[in-house]
Structure formats: structure tokens, C-alpha cells
Amino acid sequence: MSMEEEVVPVHAQKMLLTAGFVAILGMLIQFYRVVWLKPRRVGLELNRQGIKGPHPWFLLGNIPEMIIFEYKLHKPRFQDQDHAHVSHQSWIHSIQPSFQHWTNLFGRTYMFWIGNIPILYASEHSLVKEICVHSSLELGKPVHLKDSFGPLLGEGISTSNGPTWAYQKKIIAPQLYMDKVKGMYNLIVESANELVNLWESKMEKDGGGIVDVRIDEDLKSFSADVISKACFGSNYSKGKQIFLRIRALQQALMNRSNAICIPGFMYVPTENNREIWRLEKEVRSLVLTVVEERKQNKCEIDLLQIIINGAQATELSFMSMENFIMDNCKTMYLAGHETTAITACWTLLLLASNPDWQARVRDEVFQVFVGHVQDTDHVLRKMRLLTMVIYEVLRLYPAITQLLREAFEDIKFGDIQVPKGSQIWIPVLGLHRDPSIWGSDADDFNPERFANGVAGACKIPQLYLPFGAGPRLCPGQHLALTELKIVLSIVVSKFSFSVSPKYHHSPVSKLALEPEFGMNLLIKKI
């Protein structure tokens, strides 16, 4: 073999190595530009307008600092807790304590970082009002929600943006208007009566009298039953199987919550991520099975059929059509099940810890509701005291503690130019407890403040945000309020409630604000 023949492969190897090195270097530069440099420019643009905040770590942002704050300032443990009295104030600063610290340092408007995402924290009243009424598609839900919680939320109506969101809202929202919710009264009453039967059977098993019940799981089962029937009709038993797996998927996603904004972490094959992938496949398989069965029987007009019809009316590919159905079924679970059940829990807790209000609501229920269930629509409109209580519970314990938005173009709010790519976080929980809005008793349970509606309850009604605001107002609010009024009326007419010694008041913000250790109440049949 000649020298020239041996040299050619050596040159080829060098060229391949050089090309590989250049390709890797290019990928690293692109990664640095997209993951760090571009977001930093957004942050600098906010800094130039005088908006300051804590210094971020590379790739991690302020996540380490937030974890340290939660560890140091964690809510006091419950060994000295007075179970007869539930404090609505002692736990507040344990919910994302870093935000209160940064507000003290930088004011009501500042910026911080979650991973490589720049976030404008907005709690200044006029700024929040302007953001909430903004109707352009330039402002929407943060893209990272779809990326980080994709297995649970997908690209349904709660996470999608632009024309995709507008179309989904057009299809789904009308099915949740009050005139359609009226058609669900009977199934809500039926499920509430099943809950009553469950609690009565627990009493009989315990020998009668007062029984200590873990109500949060029972109320979640009740709400899952309602939304299963509303969404899946005659297939509701399979719907409940789907929701059980979605609940497990939700828990698995929360287990990685502190790392969701670290770029690429969701693709790392950790044990928890593998569990997420497995559950996601199971949910998809179950939903598609129901969809295939429904194609053979199109006579039912329930929420699932409306979603299927909406998907078929588009020019989506087959896979995109499946995703459209899948993602909105998951959204129905969260919007129509989880948050409603948790709000029912908080309401029963506050009635249990305020026996005077429990007695007043029960009197109203007996006068207005009992014996008139067949005229539910008229009856619910007359439930004035119960409505006041629910509104106050939603103020003190809103299901969603932060309202999240992202700017898809440069947008000006007041004196602030919010650059494209910025996220905006509005502290719903903080605004709902702000004395300058609600008065000196902002931390107290006082349903009387809503005697003249939301407009008469506070100085700035636009900052009462239990169901969101603006175009992204929760389309399921009518169903949620109706479900709450019916189930609470039925159980309050059958039982009296008091706080269990087993209950430890420790609200925690996950996907919703929920009791960290579950909720036990003492229940006695009337």
C-alpha cells in the first residue's frame, strides 16, 4: 500500500472530527443563545425600566433561593394548634414565602427567574387591573405550562394560545353556560345523594353518633362522579377509571415540581418521569377506547361528544385530532373536578369552625332548598347566605394562588413596556388578603362583606380573581358554583360539622390550594 493511500483516511478522519467539533460547538452556542442569552436580554430590558429583583443562578434562576426560603420559613408545625379555631392568617407566608421577602425588598412590582424564564411579578393595583382586562391574543398562558405539565394539561383550553385557544373556547365555553348547566342539575343531585349515603354508611359502621370522616377524598370522588357523567354520559364508569389515572399522573407531576423549569429535565429518564410517561400512555389508551365506542353510538350529546364534534369540524390531522380530544378531556378533569372538590372542602371546614354561620346557612337551606329540589334553578338563585359564604371561601382560599400570563409580543401596561417572552405572575392570594382592598378584616372569615355582591365587598372589584380574569375567565365557573351550591345544601341539610382533632390546618399550593394532610371533620347526622 502506498503512502498516498494511507494518508487519505487520516485526512478524512481529521475532517470528520473537525466537522463534528464545529457542529457540537454550534449546538452549544445555539443552546446558550436560546436558553440563556435571549431570556437575559428580556430581563435587561425590564431592568432598564427600573424593575429590579433577585440575581438569578445560571439555568436555575431563583429556584434554589425559593427552596431555601420554603425550608427556612416553613409554616409552624401543628403541635400547639387549636382545633376549634382555624387561623386564616398563620399559614399565609408559608405559601411561596420568597415572594413576600422580595416584595419587601423591591416593591410591589419586580422580576425574578424560574429556571431561564424571566417573570414580572405584578401586585400593584392599577397594573393588575390593566393586565386583567387586556383582550389581545398577544397575551396568553405561559408556554412552559404546556411544556412542563404537558402530560396532564396538553394543549387544551387551559394552556393553549392564539387561534387554537380561541377555537377551543368557541366550542367548549357555550356548553358550560348557565342554560346548559341547568341540564346537569339532576346528575349533581344524584351524585350528592350518593355522598350522603356513603357518610351514613360510615356512621352505621361506626355505631352511629358522631363519626370522624376524611372528607377531601370523598368530595373528590363525588366531583369526579359528576364530571364523569357530564363528560362521558353512559360511559361514565370508564370515565372514572380515566380520572383515577389522571389523579395519579397529577401527583407524579407534582413530585418533580421544583425541577420542571430546569431546561431538559422532563426528558431525563428518572423513576418519576418514567411513571409519568406510563400513566400518560394509559390515559391516552382509555380515552381513545371511549372515543372509538362513541363513534358507534353518536346519539348522546355530552361534553365528550361536543369535543369530538369540535375536533372533526377542524382541518386537523388524525394525530392532532386525537390530541385535541385528549387534552380537553384532561382539562375537564381539572377544571370540573379537582378545584370544585377542594373548594367544597374549605367551605365545610369554615362552616365547621364557624358554627353560627353553619346554623344560618342550614336555616336558609331548610327554608329555600329542602322540598324544592325539583325547581333547582329558581331555588339556587335564592340561596343568598350560601352564596355569600362560597364567595368568602373563594376569597380566603382561592383554588389558584397565582394568575399566570406570557407576552407573545411587546405590550405596554401603564408605564411598563413588557417585552416579548416575559411572563407575568399576579398574586391572587395576596390580592385577596390586601387590607387596602378588603379592609382591616381582610384575614377574617366574614361572608357579610358580600351582602351586596362583589362590587360592594371591596374597593376594587376587578381584583377579586377566584376564576381568573378577562378573556381567560374560567368557562366552567357556572358549573363549579352550581355544583358547590347543590352539594353543600344537601350535606348541610343532613349533617352537622365540627373540626376533628385529627385535622391540622396546613394549606399548601400545588396545582391548587389544598389541605396538605387531607381534611378530617366530625360529622353528626341531624
Image (cartoon, rainbow, N blue to C red):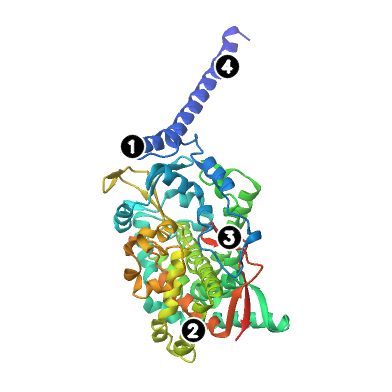
Of labels 1 and 2, earlier in sequence is: 1
- Vertical order, 221 against 21 (above or below): below
Query: Quick one: quadrant of the N terminus?
Result: top right
* Residue contact at pointers 1 and 3, CB within 8 angstroms: no
- Vertical order, 59 against 343 (above or below): above
Q: Which disc, if any, is residue 9?
A: 4
Residue that carries the numbered disc 2 in the rendered image: 186
Residue that carries the numbered disc 3 in the rendered image: 506
Q: Residues within 10 Å of mark 2 (few under 14, many from 20)?
A: few
* Residue contact at pointers 1 and 2, CB within 8 angstroms: no
Of labels 1 and 4, earlier in sequence is: 4
* Residue situated in front as seen by the camera: 210 or 242: 210
The image position of residue 311, as x and y in percent, is 42, 64
Of labels 2 and 3, earlier in sequence is: 2
Q: Which disc, if any, is residue 45?
A: 1
Q: Residue at x 60, y 12 (%)?
A: 6
- Vertical order, 136 against 32 (above or below): below
**Spatial distance from mark 2 to mark 3, Cα to Cα?**
35 Å
In the drawing, does residue 237 fall left or right of residue 408?
A: right
**Spatial distance from mark 1 to mark 4, Cα to Cα?**
52 Å
**Spatial distance from mark 4 to mark 2, Cα to Cα?**
80 Å
Displayed quadrant of residue 461: bottom left
**Spatial distance from mark 1 to mark 3, Cα to Cα?**
39 Å
The amino acid beneath tag 2 is Asn
